[in-house]
Amino acid sequence: MANGWVSTMSSSHRTILEGETHIEAHHGDMLASVQGNVLPTICYPRSPGPDGLPNSFYRHFQDALTPILLDLFNSILAGGLMPASFADADVIPLKKAGNSVSAMDYRPIAFLNSAYKLFAQVLALRLQPLLSQIIGDQQQGFVPGRTLDDSISRFQRALLEQRHDPGVPAAASAGIACLDIRKAYDSLERAHLECTMQSMGFPPLFTTLVARLHENTTVRFVVNGRRSHIIAPTSGIRQGCPLAPSLFILGMEPLLASLQGLAWQHGILLEDGPDVVPLCCNAHVDDTDIYLRSLDSLPLVLDVLHRFGDMSGLKVQHHKSFGLCLNTAVRDSEAHGIPFIYGRMRRRYLGLQVGLGDLVDDNWDACLQSTERRLRVASSKTTSLPSRARILQSIVQPKIAFMATYYVPSERWARK
């Protein structure tokens, strides 16, 4: 099944000969990488993995441990065995928003051993310079030189295409679909990732190394201080691994490349000065949005998503996704299993309140309410002036700065 997507990758991506040379050139001795780039980052406190050794242990005994780690890492690069501890992880379920009792509404974070994270960080640093060359412009997250601002700007630009035309039915109106991918990191099929990397031209030694990192992995869930029995997952990449974000966007690339191939025929055409630019899809990690010139193209896109999900394991949850019809006269609440919002209805997406019409006051009201909730919790735990200053710097200032980047507060809200 995965081979059916090889032609997509080979036709939409130029061969990464420069990248292959880059990876092979950096596949050798790790001395410079470990001493110059990775060990300094271990100064930051992090929770330990199953072996109980925190970052401070590696920092304190850096001089003694560096030669040992270098020998181990270089042996692995040469094809040697990995320590069994590299496959271990403790998984802590972190609650998302709300008060749901469903386990599916928790985000599993893997706490990995520090020695493994050092090794994975070296690989991530060597891979990152290539991402801007091999990842299409439709992906923004974790690609050097691209930011969340790029994704939000595209979304806001598409919202400017709103029209009020009662004579045009929903199927003939432009629209946006914001997709929710079910348990994205944990669902990504490892065989799909390996096939994608091969099709994109990664050298076999690097592709094989990535596959080895995910062989025989085990996890134990930690809840209320107690560990579960050992579980051996057969799919997914580990959320908490320094290499995981880069691997995930590589796994998403076949989908975005296929959808972009539909851009001129089915995407929204945007004016960019004297030029016209087609916009069909955009992704910030697993937050994926689809832009359609007419919503009668939605079944075609959903078919692509279904076939991609069968191959990659990344399946769209229709009931958690949502859409917007850019014809404000349309008030349909659903299309092809995806809920649609209209009128004054709002949904949170990419950190903002999104919907139709004027969104300025809605976003600033949400920002104020969120800040007040967090300050109520913080104020109950601290009273000293230095602590309050740190709260102002870490909670209030970032929220206001983020919101002001996209929406200038209205006079009403400024007075409020």
Image: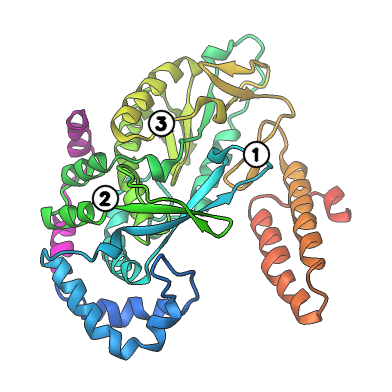
Where is residue 184, by image quadrant?
top left
- The boundaries of the magenta stretch are 1-25
Q: Which residue is mark 2?
A: 134
Do labels 1 and 3 touch, CB within 8 Å? no
Query: Nearest the camera: 139 or 380?
Result: 380
State how the image is colored.
rainbow
Left or right of residue 416: residue 151: left
- Label 3 belongs to which residue? 315
Residue 100, which numbered label?
A: 1
Q: Tell me the CA gap for discs 2 and 3.
A: 24 Å
Real-space CA distance between mark 1 and mark 3, rounded to the nearest whole angstrom: 22 Å
Circles 2, 3 touching at the beta carbon (< 8 Å): no
Report crowding for label 3: few under 14, some 14 to 19, many 20 or more residues within 10 A (C-alpha). Answer: many
Local secondary structure at mark 2: helix
* SS assignment at label 3: loop
Q: Earlier in the sequence, mark 2 or mark 3?
A: 2
Q: Residue furthest right?
A: 415
Residue 352 in the image: state x and y as whole percent.
64, 45
- Where is residue 312? Give x, y as percent: 31, 35
Position of residue 241 in the picture relative to residue 356 (left or right): left
Question: The N terminus lies in which quarter of the figure?
Answer: top left
**Residue in view at x 28 percent, y 78 percent:** 34
Mark 1: amino acid: Ser
**Which secondary structure type mostly characterizes the magenta part of the structure?**
helix
Of helix, strand and loop, which one carries label 1?
Answer: loop
The one nearer the camera, 110 or 260, is 110
Q: Along the line of sight, which residue is nearer the eye, 285 or 317?
A: 317
Magenta span contains residue 173: no
Residue 406 in view (yes/no): yes
